[in-house]
Image: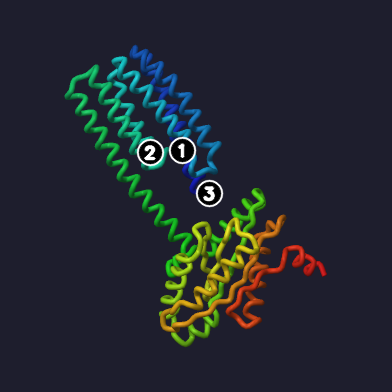
């Protein structure tokens, strides 16, 4: 996600800077041909484009930074409409660039709303100083151009979402994969350390998964994992996220969840698995290891190791149990000894 935000920011910067250069070139040409009103417009908008490039760079790590871009587009629209009302009919061609820019700079729904507003206001302003035929021709061409651009942006948006889901999700279980767990866990640890809110991790192993796989075969595994993953998605809280590793092992991240809370959640999950009828095997048990981050514990691998130790204890003590990891201070003292 971070790489995508940087890529989009660079594209926006390039767009702003190229537009600023084009406006400066147009300003020179407007002076040569005596179009002084358009010269002033170009001089006004060129620094705005440079400011847009600076904004894109300063917010490069924020993929949801759109307000500044929307403000710049609205300013451009206001300047163009002002010139249309002043009788500069030729400036209506600038609206085509505005329409295309909107789909590159702001979210799809905002871009559609902005273009609908631009079409309505500019058509009214143009009709005041031009014929109905020219206004209708402009409105039709603008609607067609922005409609095609919007359709392309819509298809690109959905294709991007599909590719992102493929990259971070396990297709069988519907849960996120381990690569996304590494990324998300680091973020949650940083957020927990900053805010002081607790963070817990639940690790679930399907008991005797390998033995059942040998008996029933891989088709059974796919059916069971699919059912198990979707069951977890149904019973976990909205703020929790589920990840699948391999060999019947699942991870659950529970932000803002204390030791007492994670034990309640884990026991409820264990009991839910035990009470449900599953494909082929009918009855199923799980071993669960839980860990809650201690203040100052910022190593994601160490946090997971503590959770895996608790899972191992649950298995060694008879399986179908929930075991909570020992506090960070105690585990640290053990390592030192």
Give the residue at mark 2.
Answer: 110
234 or 168, which is in the foreground? Answer: 234
Give the vertical position of 28 relative to 150 (above or below). above
Give the residue at mark 1.
Answer: 66
Instruction: Name the residue: 44% across, 27% down.
Output: 21
- Residue 23: where, in percent of width, then height? 41, 24
Q: Quadrant of residue 98?
A: top left
Instruction: Name the residue: 51% across, 78% down.
Output: 274
- Residue 37: where, in percent of width, then height? 36, 14
Q: Nearer the viewer, mark 3 or mark 1?
A: 1
Spatial distance from mark 3 to mark 2, Cα to Cα?
22 Å
Give the vertical position of 79 relative to 145 (above or below). above
| Disc 2 to disc 1: CB gap under 8 Å | yes
Give the residue at mark 3.
Answer: 2
Structural crowding at the residue carrying mark 1, measured as other residues with C-alpha within 10 Å and reported as few (<14), some (14–19) or many (≥20): some
- Residue 278: where, in percent of width, then height? 43, 79
Spatial distance from mark 3 to mark 1, Cα to Cα?
16 Å
Q: Quadrant of residue 224?
A: bottom left
Q: In the image, 278: left or right of 294?
A: left
Q: In the image, 280: left or right of 285?
A: left
Instruction: Name the residue: 44% across, 58% down.
Output: 165
Which of marks 1 and 2 precedes in the sequence? 1
| Disc 3 to disc 2: CB gap under 8 Å | no
Q: In the image, 203: left or right of 337?
A: left
Quarter of the image for the C terminus: give it: bottom right
Q: Nearer the viewer, mark 3 or mark 2?
A: 2
Spatial distance from mark 2 to mark 1, Cα to Cα?
9 Å
- Residue 226: where, in percent of width, then height? 43, 72
Q: Which mark is residue 227?
A: none
């Amino acid at each position: 996600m971070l790489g995508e935000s940087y890529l989009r920011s660079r594209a926006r910067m390039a767009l702003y800077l190229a537009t600023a250069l084009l406006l400066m070139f147009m300003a020179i040409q407007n002076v040569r041909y005596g179009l002084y009103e358009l010269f002033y417009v170009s001089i006004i908008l060129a620094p705005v484009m440079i400011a847009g490039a600076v904004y894109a760079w300063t917010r490069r790590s924020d993929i949801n930074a759109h307000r500044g871009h929307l403000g710049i587009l609205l300013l451009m629209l206001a300047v163009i409409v002002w010139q249309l009302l002043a009788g500069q009919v030729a400036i209506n061609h600038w609206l085509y660039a505005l329409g295309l820019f909107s789909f590159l700079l702001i979210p799809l729904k905002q871009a559609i709303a902005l273009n609908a507003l631009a079409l309505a206001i500019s058509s009214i302003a143009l009709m005041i100083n031009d014929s109905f035929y020219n206004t209708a021709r402009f409105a039709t061409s603008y609607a067609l151009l922005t409609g095609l651009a919007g359709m392309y942006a819509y298809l690109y948006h959905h294709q991007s979402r599909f590719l992102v889901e493929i990259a971070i999700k396990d297709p069988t279980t519907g849960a996120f994969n381990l690569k996304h767990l590494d990324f998300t866990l680091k973020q949650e640890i940083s957020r927990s350390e900053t805010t002081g809110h607790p963070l817990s991790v639940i690790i679930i192993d399907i008991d005797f998964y390998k033995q059942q796989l040998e008996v029933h075969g891989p088709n059974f595994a796919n059916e069971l994992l699919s059912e198990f993953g979707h069951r977890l998605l149904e019973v976990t809280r909205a703020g929790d996220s589920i990840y699948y590793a391999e060999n019947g092992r699942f991870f659950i991240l529970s932000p803002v969840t204390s030791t007492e809370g994670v034990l309640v959640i884990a026991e409820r999950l264990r009991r839910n698995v035990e009470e449900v009828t599953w494909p082929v095997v009918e009855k199923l048990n799980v071993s669960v290891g839980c860990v809650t981050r201690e203040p100052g514990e910022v190593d994601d691998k160490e946090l997971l190791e503590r959770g895996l130790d608790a899972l191992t204890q649950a298995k060694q003590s008879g399986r179908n149990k929930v075991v909570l990891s020992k506090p960070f201070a105690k585990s640290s003292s053990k390592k030192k000894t």
